[in-house]
Amino acid sequence: MNISVSNALFGWTCYGNVALFRRQKLALI
């Protein structure tokens, strides 16, 4: 349970970081 939950949170945080990076990249262009 703990491992699956941690993996889910890690996946969401990575997805959020990628979304923010793309958003900043589009803003720069």
Image (cartoon, rainbow, N blue to C red):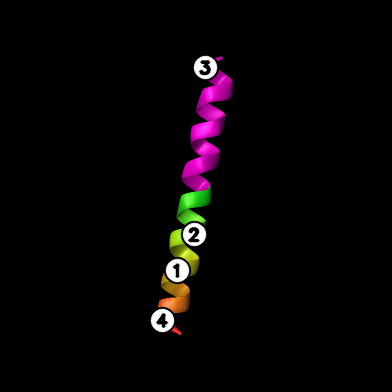
Disc 4 marks a residue whose amino acid type is Leu
User: Mark 2 and 4 residues: CB-CB less than 8 Å, in contact?
Assistant: no
Quick check: is 5 in the magenta stretch?
A: yes
User: Mark 1 and 2 residues: CB-CB less than 8 Å, in contact?
Assistant: yes
Packing grade of label 2 (10 A; few <14, some 14-19, many >=20) is: few
Residue assigned mark 1: 23
Disc 3 marks a residue whose amino acid type is Asn
The CA distance from mark 2 to mark 4 is 14 Å
The picture places residue 24, in percent across and down from the top left corner, at 41, 71
Q: Main secondary structure of the magenta part?
A: helix
Between discs 4 and 3, the one toward the N terminus: 3
Packing grade of label 4 (10 A; few <14, some 14-19, many >=20) is: few
Residue assigned mark 3: 2
Nearer to us: label 1 or label 3: 1
| Quadrant assignment, res 7 | top right
Disc 2 marks a residue whose amino acid type is Ala
The CA distance from mark 1 to mark 4 is 9 Å
Between discs 1 and 3, the one toward the N terminus: 3
Magenta span of residues: 1-14
Element class at badge 3: helix
Between discs 2 and 4, the one toward the N terminus: 2
The picture places residue 5, in percent across and down from the top left corner, at 52, 24
Q: Where 10 sits versus 15, above or below?
A: above
Residue assigned mark 4: 28
User: Tag on residue 19?
Assistant: 2
